[in-house]
Amino acid sequence: MKIAIVGAGIAGSYLGRLLEGKGIHPEVYEEGDHDTACKFRSCGWGAQSGIGGYLARAGLDLNDYLLSSMETMQFDGMVAATGLCTIDKPSLISDLRASLTVVPQRFTKEDTEAYDIVVDATGIARSLLPPCTSDLLLPTLQHRVTIEPVKENRPGAGVFGNQIPGLGYIWVFPLGQNQYHIGAGGLVFDRYEEVLEKFFSDLSVNNALTHACRCSGEIRVSSPFHSQPFTKVMRRGDGRSQQIVGVGESIGTVSPFTGEGIIYSLECAEMLADSWPDVALYTSRVLSRFAWMKKERETLDYLIAGGQKAGPRLRDRWRFYRNARRSGVRLPIQEAFRRIGSLTRWIEGEDT
Ligand SMILES: Cc1cc2nc3c(=O)[nH]c(=O)nc-3n(C[C@H](O)[C@H](O)[C@H](O)COP(=O)(O)OP(=O)(O)OC[C@H]3O[C@@H](n4cnc5c(N)ncnc54)[C@H](O)[C@@H]3O)c2cc1C
């Protein structure tokens, strides 16, 4: 059986590694360096520390990629303990790719003919599967900056919904050695440049900032349910059938509230490797495991449709609380509900 994995990002390279471990040898296609300083996209590197378990299953050690532990994080002024960290994602992907046969070339639909199974691991591009039933893309802009504190206060990790006059947030993720990713993403909102400029200008009061690079990109926050179909059966020229199957962000394994996709793409790749080559089993496992993403998407749809005027419903508050817990953010429930209730701050950018 001939197998191609298209896209050697986090999902494709991890899947390749897991399949190799089962004695299955896919050919992996990667279109190559991107126009960013790190040569990779998407370049956000925040992760839950639970990512260590996935790396261990690929024979890798989280400590080799750990840049900064975000033991505490500021959420619009409130500090909470978290289980988050930043990882050197370019280096991790390079190591995952190291044991694979990677063909450095863009794969097109015409190239599918030679394979029995083609995995669409192309992330936001979703190059091979049909369009999602109901796609939702979150635009982002991110800078990598060096920050030298002029006065005492070195910025810590933080998430700021109150700076965005739409549905979204600014993030500040330390990368170690005075480096940070600072970005903004949001729905129903397009003034990232302006909002980030103001944020940088405020930061410059107590810090010396040097900008290393910036990139814009989109994150698929549709949820897997709304990113179906995950698979497609095709007929080749000689009549034999072949299967296309998606993994990772191509099929929406991203938290719709936060845009976190790294750990869920790894989990999705693991589900595909464990179900291999039963795509029906894989589909049902993905839909069941990530059913919570469908609920988060429902909240986004409600808020985008104008629900923010009425404010978040009880179920939306509960979903935000659950989301925070899932990401290892330990907000006290009452405070979380109050803050999240004042999702008005996250949603409308109002002071409460
Ligand atoms: C600015 C930004 C910040 C983010 N920050 C975070 C964060 O802090 N934490 C987090 O968990 N998630 C974050 N995300 C989301 C996360 O990066 C993605 O969800 C995750 O990387 C998805 O992994 P993937 O392997 O499915 O796709 P990708 O990582 O996008 O990999 C897809 C790969 O396919 C390749 N490719 C595409 N088309 C073709 C083709 N036709 N032929 C060959 N190769 C092809 C691409 O070059 C790429 O290498 C962020 C996203 C963005 C845009």
Image (tube, helix red, strand yellow):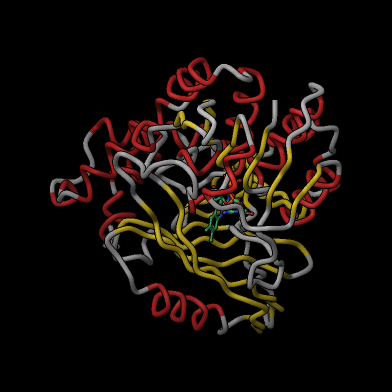
Q: Quadrant of residue 175?
A: bottom right
Q: Quadrant of residue 6?
A: top right
- Could you tell whether 141 is left or right of 99 in the image? left
Say which residue appears at 19% left-offset and 46% top-offset: 311
Does residue 346 lie above or below 251 as drawn?
below
Of the pair 174 and 46, the residue shown nearer to us? 46
Does residue 240 lie above or below 69 as drawn?
above
Say which residue appears at 40% left-offset and 72% top-offset: 192
- Could you tell whether 71 is left or right of 195 in the image? right
Does residue 307 lie above or below 225 as drawn?
below
Location of residue 150 in the rendering, given as x and y in whole percent from the top left corner: 69, 83
Of the pair 322 and 184, the residue shown nearer to us? 184
Location of residue 228 in the rendering, given as x and y in whole percent from the top left corner: 38, 33
Does residue 231 lie above or below 9 as drawn?
above
Location of residue 38 in the rendering, given as x and y in whole percent from the top left corner: 71, 67
Q: Tag count in the figure?
A: 0
Say which residue appears at 43% left-offset and 61% top-offset: 185
Location of residue 272 in the rendering, given as x and y in whole percent from the top left corner: 60, 25
Q: Looking at the image, can residue 309 be seen?
A: yes
- Could you tell whether 229 is left or right of 262 in the image? left
Q: Looking at the image, can residue 231 be seen?
A: no
> Quarter of the image containing the C terminus?
bottom left
> Quarter of the image containing the N terminus?
top right
Of the pair 128 and 87, the residue shown nearer to us? 128
- Could you tell whether 158 is left or right of 340 in the image? right
